[in-house]
Amino acid sequence: MLNIALFGPPGAGKGTQSEKLLHKYNLTYISTGDILRSEIKDKTDLGLKAKDIIESGGLVPDELVVEIIEKKIRTNQDSRGILFDGFPRTVVQSYILDGLLLKLNTSLDMMISLDVPEDELIKRLLLRAKGSNRSDDTLDVIKVRLREYEEKTTPVADYYQDQNKYHKIDGVGGLDEIFDTIVNHVEENKSKEYTNIVLLGKPGVGKGTQGQLLAKKHNLVYISTGKLLRREIVNGTEIGRIAAPYMEKGEIVPDEIPIKLIADQIKENPNANGFIFKGFPRTVIQAYILDGLLQRVNMRVSNMIELKLSTLKAIKRLSDRGKNKKLARPYDLSTELIVNRLEQYRTKTVPAITFYQKQNKYSRINADGTEEEVFNRLSEEVEKTLKKNF
């Protein structure tokens, strides 16, 4: 994810630059003031709590603000990241934000501060007050607001400066010129983006062939747990000896085995742009395991693509493969084994597909057709994922 806090005093131009950043990077906009007003207007439980506090003259407590922010983030899971405007405003809120993002398996990438001289800020705010007929925005009031901002937010800037996440941008100039400067800082300091695709589908849909083709075209690393396990079996390793009985029947091997193999593959490819996973995860538990493996290296699953094919056509493909001595696998050699694999897919892997659907990380591709036709469909879907990531 790309998480940015946009910082700056009243009149610095945060609103205008926020809109441009949201559009360019597909971010979720978090403005505590806007969210509070929206919750109050919609009469949600959180909004009603906030309204009671505000009407009684109190300040909305941090715990309620955080609850509202978390709700907003969790309801916008399609975005690429978060843009915080006006939060955090205190060091306490900075600690709170770090904790909240950690809970959501992410972190703040940078704080960008728009730096504008006080005389320019006063000029802008007086002009804005005149245009909106706000009689309360007098010179004295504006100076008080700017002084309060400086006193309260300087420690926040120091907090992120200590983490090398604070970037001061000249906020004077043309809007596009300022935006280009912001974008340059974002591009220079953002974390590397990875594209990780999980390919699932019934046995016989062509995941192996398509996965390798996709990895080659899109400069990703292909990881097939089946291929890795067969190599271990051929080499006569301890892992191979444990896995062999399961592989012969086409059954799922114990989870600790693929964990080690996948972790080794990720470690051996530190410069990869991402991975295509074929044959893993095959269960909901393995989906959690994959999340954990990727989280250790600051990555996550970008999308799960299901290759759809009728059961009858899957059986025919597997039967044909079983008759080919070069392609045949032990678990393709009898109808009983083929049916067993399809049943395992239905009972164990379909729930894993539901797991990704609930996270809005799901695409479905028709696997019926020529190898080229299916590849073109898949490649188009991967392109969409790449665009969303970058």
Image: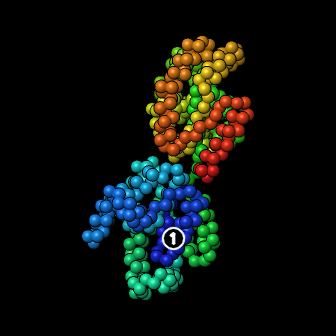
> Residue at 65% of width from left, 40% of height from top?
220
> Residue 51 appears in which quarter of the rendering?
bottom left
User: Extreme bottom residue here?
Assistant: 139
Residues 235 and 34: in front is 34
Relative to 99, is 187 on the left or the right? right
From this viewpoint, is residue 359 visible? yes
Could you say where residue 356 lies in the image, as x and y percent from the top left? Answer: 50, 39
Above or below, 68 against 345 in this view is: below
- In the figure, is residue 94 to the left or right of 188? left
| Element class at badge 1 | helix
| Coordinates of residue 143 in the picture (x, y in percent) | 42, 83
Residue 118 appears in the picture as rendered = no
User: Farthest residue in the left direction?
Assistant: 56
Disc 1: which residue: 14
Q: Is residue 50 above or below residue 241?
A: below
Q: Residue at x 58, y 30 (%)?
A: 201
Provide residue 264's location: percent of width, then percent of height.
55, 34
**Which three-letter amino acid code belongs to the residue tagged 1?**
Lys
Circle count:
1
Other residues around mark 1 within 10 Å, as few (<14) / some (14–19) / many (≥20): some
Q: Nearer the viewer, residue 11 or 220?
A: 11
Say above or below: 49 vs 140: above
The residue positioned 55% from the left and 66% from the top of the image is 19
Residue 254 against residue 163 in the figure, above or below:
above
**Residue 144 sits in which quadrant?**
bottom left
Residue 270 rendering spot, x and y as whole percentages: 59, 42
- Residue for point 61% across, 46% down: 385
